[in-house]
Image: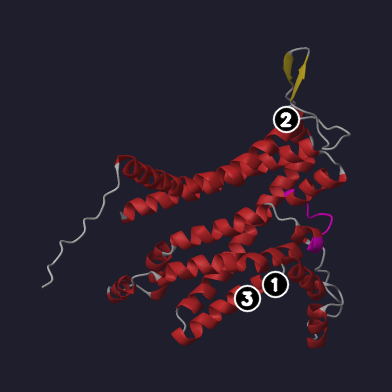
């Protein structure tokens, strides 16, 4: 007759093994929390410090083409800081004009993207579920093509003997080709076309999260559709509008490819100035100073957007 044996006891880890397991869990949790900060340091802070270091150097005929900030000689460390690169930005009106035109082009392009993107996002959000994914795909599809190829395509459309002028001549709207390519108008067209999806998608997301019972309540209380739109729908989608505007405005300020290929001599934007200083003039310190000032200009809308997001989260919380 067999006897039942008592179940074997599970051997618990000893003191050292238990301490090691707890340390791994604690450090693993800290590592997960620290990962975003590590990426920020590697991808933002470290490059920023390198560019800032170059902006305080002097131009030199060397590789790389700038002097060192510190030099160790005769047992002494000599630190040399050159602030003349930043002073040069105030002396030469070219840089001020480039900053001003970049902000102007980015602001107007953002407004155009908003005026075109909001109705498009509204149409996608209120389309049938069966066609909604197709419409979203059509919005995103141009981004799958090379950015440079798309800009070159617009050169073929806007040139004097291009598709647009030939079509207008065929319709009889114009008697001679319009000069669109290599003008500021072509720059606006290119930027709006390139960054329109970045405006549509955040607004579309905000529209899909609206509680439409509030819209129905506004209409039931006698408000007209236009007033309901501006007093109910627009405030509820303000987060999407701001997010889309930031996604368009910030990269448009430093745009280089579109002004270089579609713009003319008058299209002086900060991206073109950076290219000329880095590659044509080989003046890396001045180019770095230009980049630092541009970054400081862009930090203002970024901080404002972050503050708005925190306030919005606090209101919902």
Report which residue position mark 1 lands on.
145
**Location of residue 45 by image quarter:** top right
Specify the quadrant of the image occupied by residue 1: bottom left
As measured in the structure, the alpha-carbon distance from the residue carrying label 1 to the one carrying label 2 is 39 Å
| CB atoms of marks 1 and 3 within 8 Å | no
Q: Main secondary structure of the magenta part?
A: loop
Q: Position of residue 215 (x, y in %)?
A: 34, 72
Q: Is residue 56 left or right of residue 203?
A: right
**Badge 3 is on which residue?**
141
Q: Judge the density around disc 2: few (<14), some (14-19), many (≥20) Cα neighbours within 10 Å.
A: many
Residue shown at 83% from the left, 69% from the top = 179
Q: Quadrant of the C terminus?
A: bottom left
Q: Earlier in the sequence, mark 3 or mark 2?
A: 2
Image disc number at residue 56: 2
Q: Nearer the viewer, residue 145 or 236?
A: 145
Callout count: 3
Question: How far apart are the two marked residues, 1 and 3, measured between alpha carbons?
Answer: 8 Å
């Amino acid at each position: 007759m067999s006897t039942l044996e008592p179940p074997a006891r599970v051997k618990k880890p000893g003191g050292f093994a238990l301490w090691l397991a707890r340390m791994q869990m604690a450090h693993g949790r800290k590592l997960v929390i620290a990962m975003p900060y590590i990426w920020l340091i590697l991808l933002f802070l470290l490059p920023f410090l390198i560019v800032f270091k170059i902006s305080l150097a002097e131009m030199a005929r060397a590789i790389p083409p700038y002097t060192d900030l510190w030099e160790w000689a005769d047992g002494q460390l000599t630190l040399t800081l050159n602030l003349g690169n930043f002073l040069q930005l105030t002396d030469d009106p070219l840089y001020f004009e480039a900053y001003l035109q970049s902000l102007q082009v980015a602001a107007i392009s953002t407004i155009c993207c908003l005026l075109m993107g909001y109705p498009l996002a509204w149409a996608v959000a209120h389309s049938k579920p069966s066609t909604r994914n197709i419409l979203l795909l059509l919005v995103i599809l141009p981004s799958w093509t090379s950015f440079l190829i798309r800009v070159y395509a617009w050169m073929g459309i806007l040139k004097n003997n291009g598709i647009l002028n030939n079509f207008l001549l065929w319709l009889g709207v114009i008697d001679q080709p319009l000069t669109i390519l290599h003008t500021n108008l072509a720059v606006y067209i290119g930027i709006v076309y390139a960054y329109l999806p970045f405006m549509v998608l955040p607004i579309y997301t905000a529209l899909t999260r609206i509680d439409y019972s509030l819209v129905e309540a506004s209409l039931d209380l006698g408000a007209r559709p236009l007033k309901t739109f501006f007093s109910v729908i627009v405030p509820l989608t303000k987060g999407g509008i701001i997010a889309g505007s930031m996604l368009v405005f910030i990269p448009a300020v430093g745009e280089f490819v579109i002004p270089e290929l579609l713009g003319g001599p008058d299209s002086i934007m900060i991206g073109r100035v950076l290219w000329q200083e880095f590659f044509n003039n080989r003046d890396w310190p001045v180019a770095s100073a230009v980049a630092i000032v541009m970054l400081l200009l862009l930090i203002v809308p970024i901080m404002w957007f972050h503050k708005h997001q925190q306030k919005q989260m606090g209101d919902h919380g």
